[in-house]
Image (tube, rainbow, N blue to C red):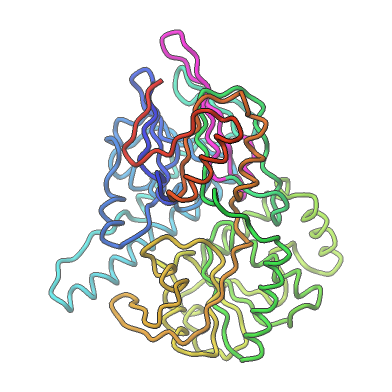
Amino acid sequence: MEIKFFGAAQTVTGSQHLITINGRKILLDCGLFQGRRKDTYERNRTFSTDPRDIDAVVLSHAHADHAANLPNLVKHGFEGPIFATDATEDMAEFMLRDSGRIQEGDARWVNKKHAKKGLDPIEALYTEQDAVEALKLFQTLDYHKTFEVIPGVTATFSDAGHILGSAITVLELEEKGRKYRIGFSGDLGRKGKPILRDPELLDVELDALLLESTYGNRSHNDPSAAIIKLEKTVKDVVRKGGKLIIPSFAVGRSQDIVYWLHQLMDEGRIPRIPVFVDSPLTSNISKIFARHEDLYDEETKQFVGLDSHKGHHGPLRYPELHYTASVEESKAINEMSGPLVVISASGMVETGRIVHHVRNTVESPDNTILIVSWQAPHTLGRRIVEKRDVLHIWGDTFKRRADVQIINGLSAHADEKELLEWCEPLKGRVGKIFLVHGEPKPQQNLKARLEANNFKEVYAPKSGDAFEF
């Protein structure tokens, strides 16, 4: 048996880990890599192995960096099953099709620029129809229900508490009479996160654990401190009469922000100003949340119950909140006067409507761009976080006069302490730990902390590294 690491290896994007056993191949996740545009385009077109040789995909959750290269995998010949939870399939139904439309739209935009400069056109990474073909391959499973991945390999999902439907996977494998058990954390959530239940703990013996390490050297702020900063930022935008632009991942983070703004308004801590969720994908994902109330934590179930008496329809619906659908509705926001809030995807400001909103607001000091998630190197979001005075957006140059605020406390990822606490029940029960989905510094710190805590074999594999068992 071999585990090969291709994506999310000493980086946090493009999650892809390949298991080879009995001459067959299982891919854990198939996410998009994000970074420099040229590097990103080429890297996402290339797979660690021929997609036609992959027998099955096990998907941890629907975030783009874990799932959004599935249509490309299918485009290049993959025909096997894609195993996921029911909520993950529901979100992927919209997320993958939306991603296909974005790929097509961005290719058209770039090609217009290329035509003016006499450059060759580019091909979309994949299309919406490719996404439709990928969705046909999904097979859904409930948490705690063991299923066969391929002959000789079974898997079981547990709740990762990261986004709706996110899963921790335990694989049981047998080769030449020897049995193995591998754990894959996917992205681990946090205790006390809005709407969702806390991550479940594993009570098993493991030969290997693939453990995310995004914040392996950081402690998150207390969520209450993050909410206080959100409150202050909104109040400041109201004072200036400007627009608050929030780039946010459509799956998970946007729902958190909508939820917190709902609570702040209900508690009278911020004025009731218009909030626009300008992303058809985010709007559809919010509808999926309403279909999976069984996955809510107890606090949210109580909040939903209270809202029913006030005429609301759950945590993600309230009078000030507007979900836009059409391009015309999106463009109309540019003509509106503030104060108002715009929440739009993508979270790293690389694609989608958020790029247009940044272009239209970044040069006014009345406006604020609020970053609520980690930004990968070489993305527009990272350049905004660095508060660069000049931003290059789709070939045009802008002077940044808008204020930039950053909130880290809303992360859906476990921090250093939470990762160590999650691993504690596995002490003495796990062979090798492979740190994935993290940059080198967080991984080095988490590796040292785990080793100091008597976890003997901890590795941080690079892309292309392979380990045999």
Instruction: State the image coordinates of residue 133 (x, y, percent, origin top left).
Output: 38, 45
Viewer-nearest residue: 14 or 286 = 14
Residue 395 higher or lower than 186, as above or below: below
Image label count: 0
The residue under the point 45% across, 78% down is 358
The residue under the point 28% across, 42% down is 76
Instruction: State the image coordinates of residue 468 (x, y, percent, origin top left).
Output: 37, 23
Classify the position of the N terminus by image quarter: top left
Which residue extends farthest front?
A: 452
Which residue extends farthest left?
A: 118
Q: In the image, is 138 to the left or to the right of 417?
A: left
Viewer-nearest residue: 43 or 129 = 43
* Most common SS among magenta residues: strand
Residue 118 higher or lower than 418, as above or below: below
Q: Is residue 157 within the magenta segment?
A: no
Quarter of the rendering containing residue 20: top left
Q: In the image, is 44 to the left or to the right of 195?
A: left
Q: Is residue 169 within the magenta segment?
A: yes
The residue range painted magenta reads: 158-187
Q: In the image, is 236 to the left or to the right of 175?
A: right
Residue 333 higher or lower than 290, as above or below: below
Quarter of the rendering containing residue 97: bottom left
Instruction: State the image coordinates of residue 423 (x, y, percent, origin top left).
Output: 62, 35
Instruction: State the image coordinates of residue 99 (x, y, percent, origin top left).
Output: 41, 58
Classify the position of the C terminus by image quarter: top left
Viewer-nearest residue: 446 or 274 = 446
The residue under the point 30% across, 62% down is 37
The residue under the point 45% across, 83% down is 362
